[in-house]
Amino acid sequence: MASAALAIKTERLSKRYRLGATTAGYATLAESVANFVRRGGRQAKQERHVLWALRDVSFEVEPGETVAFVGRNGAGKSTLLKILSRITSPTEGYATLHGRVGSLLEVGTGFHGELTGRENIYLNGALLGLTRREIDQRFDEIVAFSEVEEFLDTPVKRYSSGMAVRLAFSVAAHLEPEILLVDEVLAVGDLAFQRKCLGKMSEVASTGRTVIFVSHNMAVIQALCRRGIYLEHGEVQTDGPIQTVVADYLRALEDKAVALDLSERADRRGSQDVRLQRITIRGRDGSGTIASGAPAEFSFELRGMTRGLSCFFIVYDQLGHPVTSVSSAHAAPQDVYVHQDEPHFDCHFDELLLVPGRYRLDVQIHGGGQLQDKVEGAAYFDVVDAIVGGRPLSMGESVGHLVLPTRWVGPESGVA
Amino acid sequence: MAAAQPTIDIPTVRIDPPRGLIGFDLGPLWEYRQLVFFLTWRDLKVRYKQTVLGASWALLQPFLATVVFTIFFGRVAHLSSEGVPYLIFSFAGTLPWTYFSNAMTTGSNSLVAASSVITKVYFPRIALPISSVLGCAFDFLCGAVLIIPIMAWYGVSPTLRLLTLPLFFLLATVTALGVSFIFAALNVRYRDVKYVVPFLTQIWMFATPVVYSASGLHQPWRVLYGLNPLVGVINGFRWSIVGVGQPPGLTTVASVAMSLAMLVAGTVYLRRVDQSMADVI
């Protein structure tokens, strides 16, 4: 029984979604009956609009391995996790899982606002498959981890969103499953709590349990995982050491950005009422060269309009590590809002304090209270060396991401 | 080597594509039996939160309905109650009917109401309609306590027949489960169910001897009438509490058969829908 030793094994796992009327919403009974009659009672023919979210995905994971899945929006990562956690079933192929599966796909589901924190711990634990006795055993630990002791007997509807998330994460984190599935939850909560969550994940990994991790943060992925699997269009592109996989993924991301016009790209998320059309990055006086410490302007052209539009972007370095994020969501006195026929956001930097090198932008447009458009690797730009604060910089010498203009006081040695 | 290590019972799960009409595997439901308990408990807790009268609503609901029926159908319309006081006659019908109609309504809505959980966590989805029905069963048991004062008030002395009452309660529960499974599963794909169920509840009530007596019917219509499982339930309640009407016979057999058929059909259909539920709901 060699296969019994594997924590996860998938064999040609595939998932097909039908696009169009059935996925756009639920059909009405009358429509279905009418269709059925039209077809003369025969089975529906294969629909034309078919999307393979996963195609022939086969891999094996040993117990105790920590594996990261990387890929663009819509590459199939979330579908894979949904199948592994049995939320949805595959269309073809199969998977075997040796051990209990816990998932942190979306924490806090199943919380009921009218129930107290204590009651929700039990309900949520039961939803995640714990028995009453198991919850009793972990109760104190869960409460301590969540830091909501004083509010245990308060209905959760009176909690702040941060408290609710902490409590939910604590329940999920104390499942102690043999296989843990994690999808980008690290974005929740405050910084201190995020650090705690990361700690919990590496603790889980170090105790010989299996962790499957999905994130866009290459720094975290490379810190936590030794193996990666890169998915593209639902298929496995690369499976191997994390460095190789991340490099492949980042290269593919850049190739796509270079090859395709932004408005033609399909790998986006959001309701798409407003779409990102074009990004222009200019340096001093509108030139194409962007220099360290010099002014720069990032211009985002949009199509469509909703109320409350805002622009958010993250700058990543060449290794996929996030450098900084910029948002227009909270207006400042120096912002200018004018009527525009073709809406666009211009983000001005008086001094772009980035170390010379190549950078990538992931852009999100929010509006009308929801995510409108999100594109990973929407643009790439190179920062060249320049004189910052009267001092020359060059690409090889600077460490880190920031260049700060400085003024020194020191001993007079050279002139003596 | 491996044998020397402390062996814990680690389960292996195989995830396969859906395959047609497969029988329902009760294993997962048994594994999650405590979830059924917690969900039932949540439903009850939430239902009576922020109400002044709290769980006394469970008693008031069937009682007030009985009083209204007694005034309109007993006093004003002079419907026959087979020689017993109309109030007790009506209560024996209203009590199980209130249970059934509440269970059908909440059960049909149980999956759609939990859509945010269904798309994010795995658990046997059948636990949701089951716990909805069980929550209503709890309300029924509270309301059933009223039988004692009502019987005492009208001087109806209990007989051994009363011992059969749990069987008719069981019949009502099985029917409610079957109907809830079917409608809850249909509701996942067709939201029309939301509009159909209230309407169906009304029609079903007229097709059930809640406010009137069914003893005027002759064979074979009586057995045919029994294909409405609620006929078997309410006849059984009347017979065991106040002793009116025919003792359980062929009509009851028809009700039981229909009820079981609905339970099986509901379970199979729900199982089928279960596999694509998260993609459709």
Image (cartoon, coloured by chain):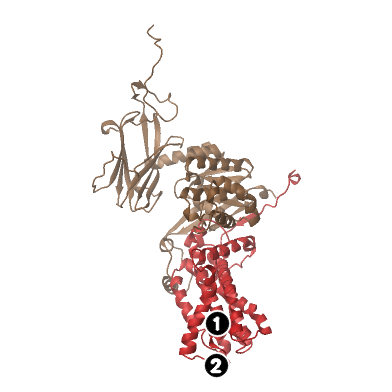
Label 1: how many residues lie within 10 Å, few (<14), some (14-19) or many (20+)?
Answer: many
Judging from the image, mark 2 belongs to the subunit labelled: B
Residue type, label 2: Gly
> Among all residues in the image, which is located at the extreme front?
B153
Q: Position of residue A34 (x, y in %)?
A: 42, 73
Q: Nearer the viewer, residue B56 or A192?
A: B56
Residue type, label 1: Phe
Circle 1 residue? B91
Circle 2 residue? B216
Q: Earlier in the sequence, mark 1 or mark 2?
A: 1
Q: Position of residue A325 (x, y in %)?
A: 40, 39
Residue A154: mark in rendering: none
Q: Colour of chain A?
A: brown
Q: Position of residue A369 (x, y in %)?
A: 36, 52
Q: Nearer the viewer, residue A270 or B48?
A: B48
Looking at the picture, does residue A74 appear above or below residue A397? below
Judging from the image, mark 1 belongs to the subunit labelled: B
Looking at the picture, does residue A325 appear above or below residue A120? above
